Amino acid sequence: MSYLVEIWLAAGLVALAAGAAGYIVVLRRAGFAAHALPMAAFPGAAAASLFGFPLWAGLAGFALGGAGLLALVQRSVRRDAATALLLALLLAVGALCLSLSGHYAGSVYGLLFGQVFALGAEDLPVLGVIGFCVPVLLFLALRPLSLSALSPELMRVQGGRPFAMEVFFLAVLALAAGFAVPVTGALLVFSLMLGPGAAAARLCSGPLAGLILAMGLALGLAWAGLGLAFLTDWPVGFFTGVGAALIYLLARVKTG
Amino acid sequence: MLEFLQSGPVQSALLLSAAAALLCGALGLFTVLRGQAFAGHALADVSSAGGAGSLLFGISPLLGFLLFGVAGVAGLEILQPRRAAGRDEAAGILLGAGLGGTALLLHFCVTTRGAAGAAQAVMFGAMFSTPPGTALWSCLLAGGCLAVLALIARPLLLASLDEELARVAGVKLRVLGLVFLLLLALGVTLAAMTVGAILATALLIGPAAAGLRLARGPLAAALLSMALGLAACWGGIALAYESYGWMPGRTWPVSFFIVALVLVFYAAAGLRRWA
């Protein structure tokens, strides 16, 4: 398999997971949480390079740890302030790990804005599992996920547990975001999720159609960004960030 | 100790961080009360494009961060819907577009100027390498902003706590909100130059959240928040200066110390309230 096809596949798999997660993020109005959570991948990858354990282990460990912390933080009185502080903590720890590992300057850009061309064939199986499992899990849990976000009281009356759904959602989100970081970077995973998700939520009335449209838009965004980056030699992150804004604006213009 | 205070870069770092901490401490109080932490964070992220641009074109970082911070306010005004529901969404989209621009400008910094440390400087701060003079301008800017904030503090506090009541009392909510956002853009600009664009939120939110946990009145909370921010910044600079000898050849970033101190204050304020 040629090198470019591998990158193409990796970006596509990541986009499927990110698009599905992004739609639920918009549905649950969890934009800030979704921005903070991918930041956990930054110290994760930095710690992996400092202590010498595999990148995937660092990403997954910190993603799940970050989801746990975020779930706790979300219960506090001023949740947006607490989320902001958790975000700063994750980034500062990542900066420290990179600085101590001695290749600070070079790694910062890649981790924050993506280094898709550093991926290889050995990464594809993990990305394949993520790209398949995240949309399926979110689809299966679509009803309780929307209910616990729209009306936690109603869910409690029905015998469900909204907090458990919150933890589950954040864990899935953390995995989807964490593994997208090598492709888009910690800062721009969020664009890949939110742009398609917000556009799909505006354009579709049914949740299933919305989920599928969000995945399709994310796939288009990722592949278009990759192709343009390859043609122009500009960073993928630029096309992802600006493209996500364009998708969102078009959807807003169309729905009025 | 004397040696520490006589170093030129340390002096301008102390001045710059004091301006950022005092202004952000006061602004942060309103930001937390109004639930605009995400908007503040988005403005800081968008301003990072200006920081990258200033490195690329060789203009003053203060000017670069400032231009894009103000452009971010314009973007928020245009994109954000009146109702609260879609606000995070709009702020998030704006933030992503801004960071995309940062990615491109930083890429040009590395390819055309060979500035490999550009990303680190813009995103995590380059306090010790601010051009001389910038610190003084920052102090003047912070002073001016604090004066404006003091003028609008009373109606702004009312509008932040009870919008309906403020409307009945004849407060022009939209104008007031816009003025506050502009001040916020200036505040996060200074914070972005101090601790870096993506850590600016810590300086804005942390001391204010701690101050709100401890103090009783709004004025006491604002003063405490400003003091805590200043203590975190100056303590962080002192620690970073000390840390040169800890692990030879490996540096501890000053922004890490400042953010860590801010979080310690926040956590300690939480414990104090529980006890």
Image: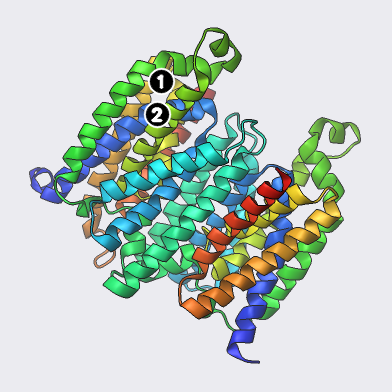
When asked about the image quadrant of residue B182, the answer is: top left
Dot label at residue B27: 2
Residue A183: percent from the left, percent from the top?
A: 57, 70
At numbered mark 1, what does the secondary structure look like: helix, strand or loop?
helix
Query: How many numbered marks are there?
Result: 2
B197 to the left or right of B234: right
Question: In which chain is the residue bearing label 1?
Answer: B
At numbered mark 2, what does the secondary structure look like: helix, strand or loop?
helix
> Image height check: is B215 above or below B264?
above
B120 to the left or right of B74: left
| Residue ranking furthest to the bottom | A1
Q: Residue at x 49, y 45 (%)?
A: B42
Depth check, front residue: B166 or B129: B166
Dot label at residue B221: 1
Q: Amino acid at mark 1?
A: Ala
- Is residue A123 among the parts visible in the rendering? no
Of the image marks 1 and 2, the number of the one nearer the N terminus: 2
Q: Residue at x 56, y 63 (%)?
A: A240
> Image height check: is A126 above or below B251?
below
Q: Residues within 10 Å of mark 2 (few under 14, many from 20)?
A: many
| Residue ranking furthest to the right | A158
Q: Residues within 10 Å of mark 1 (few under 14, many from 20)?
A: many
Residue B149: percent from the left, percent from the top?
A: 35, 22
- Is residue A45 among the parts visible in the rendering? yes
Dot label at residue B31: none
Q: Amino acid at mark 2?
A: Leu
Q: Residue at x 53, y 54 (%)?
A: B96
